[in-house]
Amino acid sequence: MDSQTIVAPMTPAGVSAVAAIRVSGSKVREVVCLLFGESALKNLKPREAKLATARDYRTMVGDDRKTAQVIDCLLYIFFEGPNSYTGEDVLELYPHGNPIIVRELIQVIKSVDGVRLAEPGEYTRRAFLNGRMDLVQAESVADVIHSANRDELKNAHRLLGGALSKKVKTLTEQVMDISARLELDVDFAEEEADPDYATWGVKISAIRESVESILKSFKGKAAVSRLPLAVLYGAPNAGKSSLVNALLGEDRILVSNIPGTTRDFVEVRLFLDGGEIRLVDTAGIADKATDALDALSMEKSKEILAEADMKILVLDGADDKCEERASQPCLHGYDRAQHLVLERSESTKTKDERGECCGDACVLIAEPTGLGTKCKDESCDRICAGMTNEENVIARNDSGACREQSVAEAIQPDFVVVSKSDLGASRPGGASRLPEQSEGSSESRLRISSKTGEGLAELKRAMNAALFKKIENSEDLWITSEREKTCLEEALAGIDRALALIRTNPAVELLAFEMQLVRRSLQSITGEISSEDVLQKIFAGFCIGK
């Protein structure tokens, strides 16, 4: 291991109230003396926070220490090895979070002979090499830092606390016990009777079950760390951008009374109780595009809706007709799922063929496959397929039966928000209320006001409940490391080979060899057996200062 002392900031670059700097290695005491003087070194006590003025004593005139340039008045704590994060002597400094101060402190510390800037993940690597943690715990440090939701963070803390390490250690001990007995049989093969393969088979099968159970818990980091996607959509000027700004508590998106202000979808990050999510404000979806750019904007909105984990339809609460259309069922009794837009098919007739009843190209009004434009033949009780999405959205006029829906409302939402409740407060039922099932609809709805804040807390709770569903068996842990997964797969393959050998009554030497390979695979998980290349790959992905 490198014997040099390392220094790095533990907090991100930028202005903050407080910053943190860590120094680790044999030169820590010299750094204390350089920054705070010999008196500080004489009174240095482990784990005691002290307030002192850090100076650059390289700038002092003669022997007058008071002439040295002041860097900052700060707190510092000394941790004596091996009882520290890295297992070495560690000094942590907590200056004001001015980048100038942080930079000057690091420059002064680096002036001590044998001190250099730390590499990514070097502190945690030294902690592993000095026995302060195993490799599973070292990898979980990055998971704790980068967890995107509460469940992922809880799992990372379990890994850091050694929950997986204990399971692997138990399995390793069981394999070592079997290996020892096998090797004993090898040494005394001529003096003993035939080995008891049946007993070994039961024990090895039990180990296989445990290894397979851990392996099945694997969840790729990309999937676990993916932020849930919630998309707001609706007609132009429904209040989507205002709602995003209200949820964020800041004016992040341009808001205007002019319909079509939002031309492209805008993505922001929103923190809920369960974790961080991606919240997208889309361009308004109208029944007809006003121009080519408007059509392209609506197409982009539909594309992002296809990826959404939660689709939230925003209705203009100030528009009585819009709310009435959305809340009331079809006069024929069909629900909204039965009014899906028809798609084109090979059997679709051309536009010229729609002059009369389209026969097989039509669908019965009573069928829940969709509704379209009625045939010109009034005696025909079918409707034509093959129209554009916009044409197929309108079921029939009121005299025909079904009410009209907008293009936006035809997209099945997971949740409906009626905006601008402050403008409709005088109407019956205008007050904000908790999510409930609307009559004739399968989705929940909520009245909100971006201006007054009514309903925003309830909306956040509803989004949190839907996007961060409680995981069953939350006490169980899962693994996210591809390296650990590979080691487990290698161990499982070795166990399967050993069980296959047992069924053929092999030489004990072959069985002992396979179990040695299984043991090495399990020991590789916790780092009892590791190579420099493996360590370099793991810690290269860490940030500097961790």
Image (tube, rainbow, N blue to C red):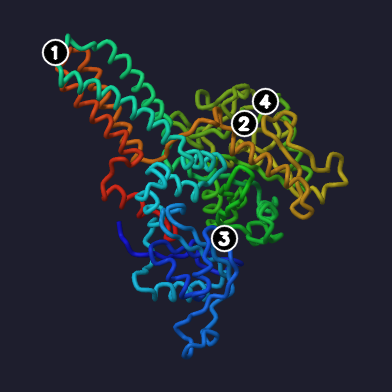
Q: Which residue is mark 2?
A: 339
Residue 110: x and y in percent read 40, 73
Q: Earlier in the sequence, mark 2 or mark 4?
A: 4
Q: Mark 4 and mark 3: span between their CA atoms? A: 72 Å
- Name which residue type carries label 1: Glu
Mark 4 element type: loop
User: Residue at left 45%, top 53%?
Assistant: 85
Q: Mark 2 and mark 4: span between their CA atoms? A: 8 Å
Q: How dense is the environment of label 1, judged by Cα within 10 Å: few (below 14), some, or many (20 and up)?
A: few
Residue 86: x and y in percent read 42, 54
Q: Which residue is mark 1?
A: 191
Instruction: Tell me whether the residue at label 2 lies in contact with that at label 3, contact meaning CB atoms closer than 8 angstroms.
Output: no
Residue 334's disc is 4
Q: Which residue is mark 3?
A: 48
Mark 1 element type: loop
- Name which residue type carries label 2: His
Q: Is residue 374 above or below residue 536?
A: above
